[in-house]
Image: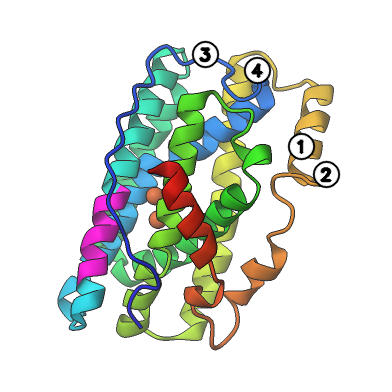
């Protein structure tokens, strides 16, 4: 099946210089959690693109080939803007983040060479997670981007829209190359765990840099914000678990109306 939605490569102009240190509601926990998430994108998404392009020669469907090209275009732009954000973080004194990214880049390039199929399967798995995140951002923008500094809100909203648009591409390529449920299940378990560890590790590193790592009240507030009633990470379970179904396809989660509305909003 070719990609579910039209994929449009947008090239927004976003200058992030002068970003306030606590750009998410003036709150260190919220900001560093979002910094952690944002900072895995540059090298993570470059890896996604390499993983998918590796199998381009195996694809015959012209619609899927066109979708692969546009997917690579979108992810390239996302990586570029999130890399700018990492540069801002470095300038603010969080040098551990670009250092982590260099290790991550080397590790992922090694994976591309040594385990191309697992790279593709994990890309498809992580694209399911970014699609769920995108769906949440577009469904509940007040909770997600409402408190963000306007440029970061634009970055997250634009990124969310495009993640929804191209969410089926890596999956469709995987279905051509290796349509095996076992591989898909293993990749999702690994990807979910890996992303979880990566984001918490980075959040902790960033808070430590500010001398805030061991503040129970800050963590309690942060965890409530994420997992409490109406929390940012609540409400994903049902859609997340659909991945593990035998007949799953990303298109079964209908983002059509959301995408339509957000195309007008993002422009
Ligand atoms: Fe992306
Ligand atoms: Fe993506």
Q: What element carries label 1?
A: helix
How far separated are the C-alphas under marks 4 and 3? Answer: 9 Å
**Residue 119 appears at what percent x and percent y?**
36, 64
Q: Distance between the residues labelled 1 and 2?
A: 6 Å
Give residue 249's position: percent from left, percent from top.
Answer: 49, 79
Q: Is the magenta stretch mostly helix, strand or loop?
A: helix
| Residue 69 in magenta stretch | yes
102 and 260: which one is in front?
A: 260
Numbered circle sitting on residue 176: none
Task: Identify which residue, 214 or 8, lies in the foreground.
Answer: 8
On the image, numbered disc 2 is attached to which residue? 228
The residue lying at 36 percent from left, 83 percent from top is 1
- Tell me which label, 1 or 4, sits earlier in the chain: 4
Asked if residue 29 is positioned above or below residue 229 in the image, the reply reads above
Magenta stretch contains residue 127: no
Q: Say which residue appears at 36% left-offset and 77% top-offset.
A: 172
Q: How far apart are marks 1 and 3 (CA)?
A: 21 Å
- The residue to which callout 1 is attached is 225
Report the Cα–Cα distance between label 2 and label 4. Answer: 20 Å
The residue carrying mark 3 has its beta carbon less than 8 Å from ligand 1: no
Distance between the alpha carbons at the discs numbered 1 and 4 = 14 Å
Instruction: Quickly name the residue at label 3.
Output: 20
Which of the 4 image quadrants contains residue 7?
bottom left
- What residue sits right under mark 4 in the picture? 26
Judge the density around disc 1: few (<14), some (14-19), many (≥20) Cα neighbours within 10 Å: some
> In the rendered view, would you say 162 is above or below 100?
below
Please provide percent x and percent y for residue 240. 63, 67
């Amino acid at each position: 099946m070719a990609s579910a939605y039209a994929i449009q490569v947008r090239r927004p102009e976003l200058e992030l210089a002068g970003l306030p240190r606590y750009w998410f509601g003036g709150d260190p926990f919220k900001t560093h959690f979002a910094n952690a998430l944002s900072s895995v994108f540059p090298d993570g998404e470059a890896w996604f693109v390499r993983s998918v392009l590796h199998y381009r020669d195996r694809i015959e469907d012209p619609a899927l080939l066109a979708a692969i090209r546009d997917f690579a275009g979108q992810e390239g732009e996302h990586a570029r803007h999130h890399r700018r954000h990492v540069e801002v973080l470095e300038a603010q004194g969080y040098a551990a983040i670009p250092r982590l990214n260099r290790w991550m880049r080397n590790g992922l390039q090694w994976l591309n060479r040594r385990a191309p199929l697992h790279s593709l399967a994990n890309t498809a798995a992580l694209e399911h997670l970014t699609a769920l995140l995108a769906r949440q951002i577009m469904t509940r923008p007040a909770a997600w981007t409402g408190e963000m500094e306007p440029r970061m809100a634009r970055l997250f909203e634009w990124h969310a829209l495009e993640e929804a648009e191209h969410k089926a591409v890596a999956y469709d390529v995987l279905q051509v190359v290796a349509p095996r449920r076992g591989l898909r299940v293993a990749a999702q378990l690994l990807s979910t765990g890996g992303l979880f560890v990566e984001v918490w590790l980075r959040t902790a590193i960033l808070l430590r840099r500010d001398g805030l790592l061991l503040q129970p009240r800050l963590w309690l507030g942060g965890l409530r914000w994420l997992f409490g009633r109406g929390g940012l990470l609540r409400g994903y379970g049902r859609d997340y678990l659909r991945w593990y179904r035998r007949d799953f396809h990303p298109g079964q989660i209908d983002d059509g109306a959301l995408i339509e509305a957000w195309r007008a909003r993002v422009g």
